[in-house]
Amino acid sequence: VGTLIREIRTYGPDVCHLHGTTLLVFLVSVYLRLSGRNYVVTVHGIAGVEYRKAYERSRRTVFLLKKWLYGFAEWLIIN
């Protein structure tokens, strides 16, 4: 994360384009938001939906927890 943030500071793009809803994207989006930089996010699949489907198939609690966690992280990134 630190290396990527240094690159953003050095290059100084007008807009940053982030892909996905991973932890890295979340952390970088927080930095960009706090620093007042513009960014867009392209979401390739919605993790909250994917984990809900996995939970419905297996009924394993871990998938339900991941659905809530990733769903919330996605909401934070996109909003």
Image: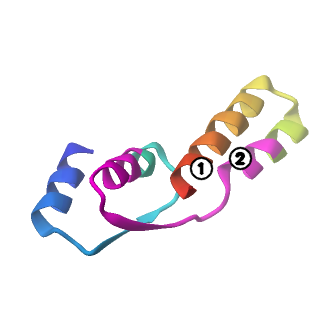
Which residue occupies the extreme bottom position in the image? 14
**Viewer-closest of 1 and 60:** 1
Which residue occupies the extreme top position in the image? 61
Query: Magenta residues, as a range?
Result: 27-52
Q: Quadrant of the C terminus?
A: bottom right
Compared with 4, 66 (above or below) is: above
Left or right of 35, for residue 28 = right
For the residues labelled 2 and 1, say whether their Cβ atoms are less than 8 Å apart: yes
Q: Residue at x 57, y 64 (%)?
A: 43
**Viewer-closest of 72 and 2:** 72
Q: Nearer the viewer, mark 2 or mark 1?
A: 1
In which image quadrant can residue 1 be found? top left
**Viewer-closest of 1 and 53:** 1
Q: Which mark is residue 48?
A: 2
Q: Amino acid under label 1?
A: Glu
Instruction: Please state the horizontal and vertical placement of residue 13, each as a whole percent of the image.
Output: 22, 72
Instruction: Please state the horizontal and vertical placement of residue 21, each as a whole percent of the image.
Output: 53, 53
Query: Any magenta on residue 43?
Result: yes
Instruction: Please state the horizontal and vertical placement of residue 46, each as a whole percent of the image.
Output: 67, 56
Disc 1 packing (10 Å; few <14; some 14–19; many ≥20): many
Find disc 1 in the rendering and name its residue: 74
Compared with 47, 57 (above or below) is: above
Q: Amino acid under label 2?
A: Gly
Disc 2 packing (10 Å; few <14; some 14–19; many ≥20): many
Compared with 64, 40 (above or below) is: below
